Image (tube, rainbow, N blue to C red):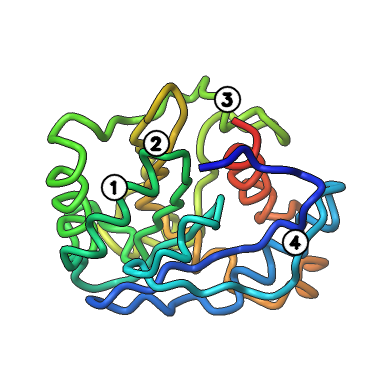
Amino acid sequence: MAEVNLQNKFFFTRIQYESGDWDVDQRMPSNILNSLVEYSTLPVDDRENIVSLSNEEIFRCPFTYLSGHKLVEFTAAERRNFETYVNNGGFVFVDDCNHDIDGLFAKSFESQMERIFGKSAMFKLPKTHALYRNFFKFDGPPTTSQELNGWGDDIVHDYLKGIEVNGRIGVLYSNKDYGCEWDYDFRNKRFYKIDNTRFGVNIVMYALTS
C-alpha cells in the first residue's frame, strides 16, 4: 500500500462483511472525525466511507474500522482481501461491541485471525506502546463506561491486542467497546469533563504515520 500523503483528506472507512452485524455504532465515525478537526490539522472528509471487505476498493483505504456483536466468519474473498490489505500496509481497528473476551464476536474474530496470520500472531500491546503517546498521552487503553457498568464479561480490560506486520500494527483489536463509548452526537462532548474520543485521535494518527 502506498505511503499516506497527509495533504490528502483523511476518510473514515467502515468494513462491511457478510456475516454478523457490521453496521453498529452509527454516530461514532462522525464523532471521531469531529475530534480530528478539533484537535489536529489533518484534512478530513466528513463523510463515512463504507467498503465491502470482498471489494478491491479496500486497498485504497489507509484506515478501516470493523465491529459487531455477532459471528465473524469471512468468506474466502473476504479472508484473502483482509490478509492482503494488512500485509501491504493497511490498518484495521477492530472493536468488539460485546466487550466480552468469551463472546461470539470475540471468539469468532480471533479464530479468523489465527486462520489468516497464525495462532501466535495476536499479542497484548504493552502500555508503553507508541499508540498511547503518539498524540495525546495515555497510561494504557482508556477504560469505557460499558466496562465500569459491568456489562459484557464484567471485566475491565487493561490491554488492547494487535497483529504486527513489518514492525507496525496492522490489526488493532479491542474488547473494550469503544464504538458504543463514542456513539453519541459530537455536540454532546461539551457535557464531558474530559473528551473521551481523544484516544480515537491517537488510533487514527498511529494508522497514518507509523
Q: Residue at x 23, y 64 (%)?
A: 77
| Residue that numbered label 2 is attached to | 159
Specify the amino acid type for callout 3.
Ala
Q: Is mark 2 on a helix, strand or loop?
A: loop
- The residues bearing labels 4 and 3 have C-alpha atoms spaced at a distance of 26 Å
Q: Which residue is drawn at 33% across and 35% down?
A: 163
Instruction: For marks 4 and 2, give the one nearer the viewer.
Output: 2
| Residue that numbered label 1 is attached to | 83
Instruction: For marks 1 and 4, give the one nearer the viewer.
Output: 1
Instruction: For marks 2 and 3, give the one nearer the viewer.
Output: 3
Q: Residue 19: percent from the left, percent from the top? A: 22, 76
Disc number placed over residue 130 in the picture, else none: 3
Instruction: For marks 2 and 1, give the one nearer the viewer.
Output: 1
Q: Residue 56: percent from the left, percent from the top? A: 41, 64
Q: Is residue 140 above or below residue 47?
A: above
* Earlier sequence position, callout 4 versus callout 2: 2
Instruction: For marks 4 and 3, give the one nearer the viewer.
Output: 3
- The residues bearing labels 1 and 4 have C-alpha atoms spaced at a distance of 38 Å
Task: Give whichever of 175, 33 is nearer the camera.
Answer: 33
Q: In this view, does 163 lie above or below 155?
A: above
Specify the amino acid type for callout 4.
Tyr
Q: Which residue is drawn at 40% across and 62% down?
A: 66
- The residues bearing labels 2 and 3 have C-alpha atoms spaced at a distance of 14 Å
**Which class describes the residues within 10 Å of circle 3: few (<14), some (14-19), or many (20+)?**
some
Q: What element carries label 1?
A: helix
- The residues bearing labels 1 and 3 have C-alpha atoms spaced at a distance of 24 Å
Q: What element carries label 4?
A: loop
